[in-house]
Image: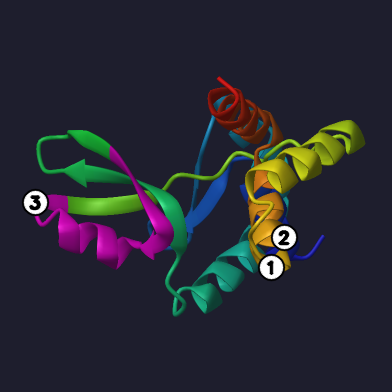
Amino acid sequence: MNPAAIIREARADGVCLELGKPGTIKATGEADAVNRWLAVIREHKADIIEALNDAKTEPIVATRWRLKFAKGELLEVSYCPPATSAYALERYPHAIDAEPIPERPRRVATEAEARELRGLIEAVYGGETDDDRADALAEALNDPAGALRCYRAILKARNT
């Protein structure tokens, strides 16, 4: 497995790999997920460090950030659209560090859910353009359970 794939797949599993002290890798995330990746990280340590160094020039963009303050306080913030650590730290000038919070992999919609979402979106956005409905469906498929609750509630409210 190449280092870029390791970094990408670890992130998809909820593990964020970053450069630590010189010659080290910092793996953050849920303990079980980090433990699953430790052997692979150790085996490919030098290559991962090189890949992380190469990627250092490109800022990390994330939806959620954990901000650290001088007295050890932590604050989790979310941004939409996703933001860089510099953006997050600019908004919280007393913060001393910001680390991205890995996104949890989302569940893929079943065919039945996708079909129902198409119908619900058509009912809610019937007068909108095809592009607008396609955008709404794409977003809904990112969180099928939440989207189904939302669109069902909208239609229920409209029908009462």
As drawn, 119 above or below 11: above
Element at badge 2? helix
Residue that badge 3 annotates: 94
Query: Residues in magenta?
Result: 76-95
The residue type indicated by label 3 comes to His
Quadrant containing the C terminus is: top right
Query: Measured from the top left, where is residue 91 in percent x and y?
Result: 17, 58
Q: Is residue 47 visible?
A: yes
Residue that badge 1 annotates: 131
Assess disc 1: are there few (<14), some (14-19) or many (≥20) residues with their C-alpha within 10 Å of its C-alpha.
few
Quadrant containing the N terminus is: bottom right
Q: Among all residues in the image, which is located at the extreme front?
A: 160
The residue type indicated by label 1 comes to Asp
Image quadrant assignment for residue 76:
top left
Residue drawn 89% across and 32% down?
112
9 inside magenta stretch = no
**Residue 75 bears which disc, if any?**
none
Element at badge 1? helix
Residue drawn 45% across and 65% down?
60
The residue type indicated by label 2 comes to Ala
Residue that badge 2 annotates: 134
Residue drawn 9% across and 51% down?
94
Check whether the beta carbons of the residues at disc 3 and disc 1 lie within 8 A of each other: no
Image quadrant assignment for residue 138:
bottom right
Query: Measured from the top left, where is residue 72 in percent x and y?
Result: 17, 34
Check whether the beta carbons of the residues at disc 2 and disc 1 lie within 8 A of each other: yes
Image quadrant assignment for residue 4:
bottom right
